[in-house]
Image (spheres, helix red, strand yellow):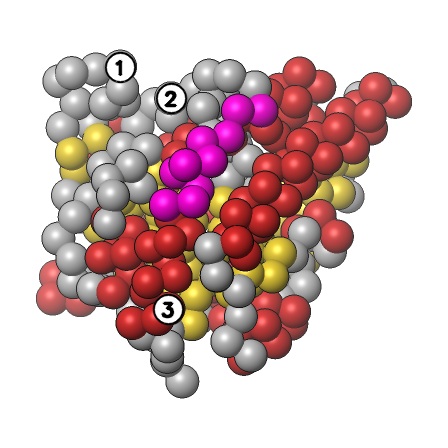
């Protein structure tokens, strides 16, 4: 079987997170064309795509406090409205990908997801496995989920990737955002921010201290939550690598998919040569 790669298109990449429900359709279309080129060049590649909800789901979720759970009937309305907003963006992304010749099949996470105190504990994986076996591209996205403790919550694309990875065991995960990787501070607000080229057990504690969240509205914890989720996954699966790149640079998504050794962005990995024992 060919290499399995998970690719996320970040909400900050495919939407303007400062303006509610504002998609960057030209960026979505360019990403789709790059992915189409990859699938033509490497027909053996198995690809699963996810995307954030950006200014569609995050604004509505923040308005109703959906991430914190249900406090009253208005909270259930917020759950429904947030799910609808996330699905609205997904329909747009799916439509553009199909127009550009990428055989995506969208799977709505909230249709099967179940959480406990914000942690994803159940999600159907068989549909994605079946789609991959037929050379299709499963697509998931950040969504709402029912929660047995707090009624409902928000699940990020990284949480979904982590759950799916434990079942599907991808070789690589690529997170394409608006900026070039992980920085010492928000590069959109701080000119002194420096790129962190590698994250591993040797510097993870220091990276945690530096990260203060992502730019714009984000109810899923920002950059720090994303890195923690991916770091925990790499610790569980040491052969897995996670690379964070900028999807704003034309051609970089395509190059990152084609070249596992590309020296771009931030690499999150478990360096076996360091002899660091799993804890």
The label shown at residue 249 is none
Q: Secondary structure at mark 3?
A: helix
Residue 122 on image: x %, y %? 67, 57
Of residues 55 and 23, which is closer to you in this image? 23
In the picture provided, is 9 more to the left or to the right than 87? Answer: left
Secondary structure of the magenta portion, mostly? helix
Closer to the chain start, of discs 1 and 2, is 1
Q: Which residue is mark 2?
A: 215
Instruction: Measure how far apart labels 1 and 2 are at the Cα level.
Output: 8 Å
Residue 73 on image: x %, y %? 88, 22
Q: Which residue is mark 3?
A: 39
The label shown at residue 189 is 1
Residue 1: image quadrant is bottom left
Instruction: Measure how far apart labels 1 and 3 are at the Cα level.
Output: 36 Å
Q: Secondary structure at mark 2?
A: loop
* Residue 38 appears in the picture as rendered: yes
Within 10 Å of disc 1 (Cα), the crowding (few <14, some 14-19, many 20+) is few
Closer to the chain start, of discs 3 and 2, is 3
- What range is drawn magenta here? 21-30
In the depicted structure, whether residue 17 falls above or below residue 100: above
Q: Residue furthest right?
A: 73
Q: Residue at x 53, y 64 (%)?
A: 103
In the depicted structure, whether residue 145 falls above or below residue 209: below
Q: Secondary structure at mark 1?
A: loop
- C-beta proximity under 8 Å, tags 1 and 2: yes
Q: Say how many tags the image has.
A: 3
* Residue 208 appears in the picture as rendered: no
In the picture provided, is 274 more to the left or to the right than 128? Answer: left
């Amino acid at each position: 079987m060919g290499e399995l790669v998970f690719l996320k298109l970040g909400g900050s990449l495919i939407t303007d997170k400062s303006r509610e429900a504002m998609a960057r359709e030209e960026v979505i279309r360019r990403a789709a064309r790059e992915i189409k080129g990859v699938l033509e060049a490497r027909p053996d590649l198995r690809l699963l795509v996810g995307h954030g909800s950006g200014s569609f789901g995050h604004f509505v979720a923040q308005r109703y406090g959906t991430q914190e759970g249900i406090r009253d009937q208005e909270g259930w309305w917020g759950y429904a409205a947030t799910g609808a907003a996330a699905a609205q963006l997904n329909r747009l992304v799916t439509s553009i990908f199909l127009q550009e010749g990428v055989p995506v099949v969208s799977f709505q996470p909230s249709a099967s997801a179940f959480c406990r105190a914000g942690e994803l504990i159940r999600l159907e994986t068989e549909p994605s496995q079946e789609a991959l076996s037929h050379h299709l591209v499963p697509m998931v996205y950040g969504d709402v989920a029912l929660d047995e403790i707090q009624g409902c919550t928000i699940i990020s694309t990284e949480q979904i990737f982590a759950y799916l990875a434990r079942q599907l065991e991808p070789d690589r995960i690529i997170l394409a955002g608006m900026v070039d990787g992980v920085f010492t501070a928000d590069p959109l607000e701080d000119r002194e921010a420096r790129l962190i080229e590698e994250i591993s057990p040797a510097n993870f504690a220091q990276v945690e201290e530096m990260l203060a969240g992502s730019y714009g509205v984000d109810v899923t914890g920002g950059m720090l939550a994303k890195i923690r989720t991916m770091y925990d996954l790499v610790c569980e699966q040491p052969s897995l690598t996670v690379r964070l790149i900028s999807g704003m640079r034309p051609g970089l998504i395509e190059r990152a998919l084609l070249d596992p050794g590309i020296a771009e962005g931030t690499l999150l990995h478990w360096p076996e040569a360091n002899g660091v024992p799993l804890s």
